[in-house]
């Protein structure tokens, strides 16, 4: 009956109606009509819907929380959270949780990274295995392992990993870079070199990228030390002279460059550093590290924004916040709510406008929570060949 009614309507009219609906409604509608199912699953409609809702403020939070099961054994739960009627003081569940497979050891829980999101797709990795998933459609795919094999008598350390969308090539990419040295680990910088590899979803392959320098800057792996912005992956790092920088990898040109951090930043000053996006620009969060001794006057949190990203990349100190119990920073939500994990493992927030500090009912071991600001989308997980790893359902 519904299909009969739809056939009487012009397709453009149906599309315009559907474009006004949130993703959750579309997910329900596609199960009640063959025509709706076909339309909603089409790549044209998916792109139109994503672009039509790009400027909406219906952002969610995706929280990854490990649950202890047994000795050195965990399971990872993804929670979908939102505020109640624009009230940032409370968070509510807006979708059933997802029990994520893999990454169930103590090592994985400590070193996992949650990357994204790009067009509703995110990545979860322990620097070896990578799960690519769309939390909205509850589908995921384990990416194929890199063909890289460490040469005999060498050791390697994964220094950085990023994920994003190349808008020029119309392709999702993962970049990972290693530092190799002879065994045992050689402190001589001349004996080390970097290897860079990129995974293309359109070809389902890993390939080498030759960096312009022998040894890339050393990345500092804080919980939220990676951010994707304007087609570029960013990491907090330091150069050869131990100067704090943001290391950048542009997904289209596949080249690295550096952005110098503010002059007040030093990796030996007992500070933690996080990258995020706030007010539509790259943002650096500098906070006292809770495990270190902090000198009087250095217990404040600074938030720096880049002016004219890509041109005059000057940092502007936008906010200086009162002392906060930050173990690791996550993001700045709605451009004024700083989200972080405390030293006791609790998810907390600080409203920059009202100076209100809140704790939420989500807790994990120190340094184990991960969080992303997320926009729902119907984006299909790319799988370009029958030989590619399978797309599975949660």
Image (spheres, rainbow, N blue to C red):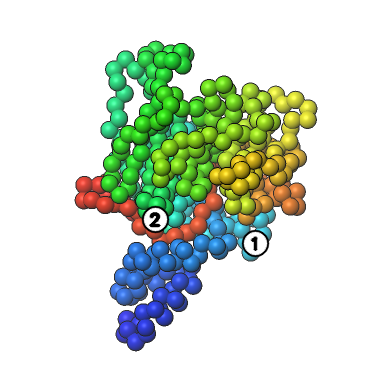
Find residue 351 and report its horizontal and vertical position in percent: 70, 50
Q: Which quadrant would the N terminus be assigned to in this image? A: bottom left
Name the residue rendered at 69%, 31% in the picture.
264
Find residue 368 and report its horizontal and vertical position in percent: 53, 37
According to the picture, the residue beneath numbered tag 2 turns out to be 138
- Mark sitting earlier along the chain (1/2): 1
Element type at mark 2 = loop
Find residue 322 and report its horizontal and vertical position in percent: 75, 40
- Cβ–Cβ below 8 Å for labels 1 and 2? no
Q: Residue furthest front?
A: 311
Left or right: residue 293 versus residue 166 is right
Element type at mark 1 = loop
Name the residue rendered at 40%, 63% in the picture.
47
Viewer-proximal residue, 260 or 278? 260
The image quadrant of residue 37 is: bottom left
Q: Residue furthest right?
A: 296
Q: Residue furthest left?
A: 386
Rendered view: 294 above or below 182: below
**Residue 329 appears in the rendering:** no
Q: What crowding class fits label 2: few (fewer than 14 Cα within 10 Å), some (14-19), or many (20 or more)?
A: few
Name the residue rendered at 57%, 21% in the picture.
241
Which of the labelled discs sits on residue 86, or is there none? Answer: 1
Find residue 297 and report its horizontal and vertical position in percent: 78, 30
Left or right: residue 234 versus residue 342 is left
């Amino acid at each position: 009956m519904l299909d009969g009614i739809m056939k009487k309507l012009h397709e453009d009219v149906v599309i315009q109606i559907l474009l006004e609906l949130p993703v959750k409604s579309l997910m329900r509608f596609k199960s009640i009509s063959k025509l709706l199912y076909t339309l909603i699953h089409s790549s044209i409609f998916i792109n139109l819907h994503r672009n039509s809702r790009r400027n909406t403020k219906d952002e969610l939070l995706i929280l990854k929380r490990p649950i202890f099961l047994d000795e050195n054994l965990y399971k990872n739960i993804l929670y979908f959270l939102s505020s109640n009627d624009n009230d940032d003081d409370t968070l509510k569940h807006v979708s059933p949780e997802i029990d994520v497979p893999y990454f169930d050891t103590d090592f994985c829980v400590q070193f996992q990274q949650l990357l994204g999101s790009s067009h509703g797709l995110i990545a979860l990795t322990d620097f070896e295995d990578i799960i690519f998933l769309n939390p909205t459609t509850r589908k995921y795919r384990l990416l194929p392992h890199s063909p890289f094999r460490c040469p005999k008598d060498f050791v390697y350390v994964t220094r950085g990993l990023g994920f994003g969308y190349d808008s020029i090539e119309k392709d999702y990419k993962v970049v990972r870079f290693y530092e190799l040295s002879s065994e045992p680990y050689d402190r001589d910088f001349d004996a080390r070199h970097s290897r860079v590899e990129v995974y293309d979803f359109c070809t389902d392959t890993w390939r080498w990228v030759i960096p312009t320098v022998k040894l890339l800057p050393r990345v500092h792996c804080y919980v939220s030390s990676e951010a994707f912005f304007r087609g570029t992956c960013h990491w907090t790092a330091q150069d050869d002279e131990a100067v704090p920088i943001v290391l950048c990898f542009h997904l289209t040109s596949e080249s690295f460059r550096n952005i110098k951090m503010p002059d007040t930043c030093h990796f030996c000053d007992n500070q933690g550093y996080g990258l995020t996006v706030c007010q539509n620009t790259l943002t650096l969060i500098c906070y006292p590290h809770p495990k270190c001794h902090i000198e009087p006057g250095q217990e404040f949190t600074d938030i720096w924004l880049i002016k004219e990203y890509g041109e005059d990349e000057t940092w502007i100190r936008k906010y200086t916040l009162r002392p906060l119990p930050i173990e690791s920073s996550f993001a700045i939500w709605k451009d004024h709510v700083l989200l972080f994990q405390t030293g006791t493992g609790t998810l907390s927030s600080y409203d920059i406008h009202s100076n209100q500090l809140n704790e939420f009912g989500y807790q994990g071991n120190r340094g184990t929570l991960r969080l992303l600001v997320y926009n729902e989308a119907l984006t299909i997980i790319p799988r370009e060949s029958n030989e590619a790893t399978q797309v599975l359902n949660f």
